[in-house]
Amino acid sequence: MPWPDDYILYSISVEDIRQVVEDEEFRELTDEEIKRVGDRIGDYIGWYDAVLMAIREVVPDVANTKEEDDEEEAE
């Protein structure tokens, strides 16, 4: 069964934010600060490049597949 387009493959939780705070020895964040940090995380993650790098690592021949398909269609 194919994956639905709206299925979430990766997310960052409040626990993840709290772990960074603890690891960096910051003071505890308020709920409002955590919400504001969560709202901004996407501004700092280049999701397109992260997906592209993961695809290239997991499926290194993926770029060749499209070229080969195009060549086969031309024949």
Image (cartoon, helix red, strand yellow):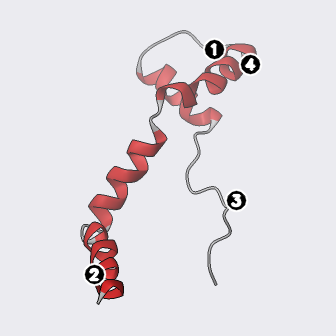
Labelled disc at residue 29: 1
Residue behind mark 2:
71
Dot in front, 4 or 3 = 3
Mark 2 or mark 1: whose residue is earlier in sequence = 1
* Quadrant occupied by the N terminus: bottom right
Residue behind mark 4:
31
Say what amino acid the circle numbered 3 marks: Asp
Mark 2 or mark 3: whose residue is earlier in sequence = 3
Label 4–label 2 contact, CB within 8 A: no
Where does the image place residue 26, in percent across and percent down from the top left? 49, 11
Give the Cα separation between the discs numbered 4 and 1: 7 Å
Few, some or many residues within 10 Å of mark 3 (<14, 14–19, 20+): few
Q: Residue furthest top?
A: 27
Dot in front, 2 or 3 = 2
Label 1–label 3 contact, CB within 8 A: no
Say what amino acid the circle numbered 4 marks: Asp
* Quadrant occupied by the C terminus: bottom left
Secondary structure of the residue carrying numbered label 2? helix
Where does the image place residue 22, in percent across and percent down from the top left? 48, 22
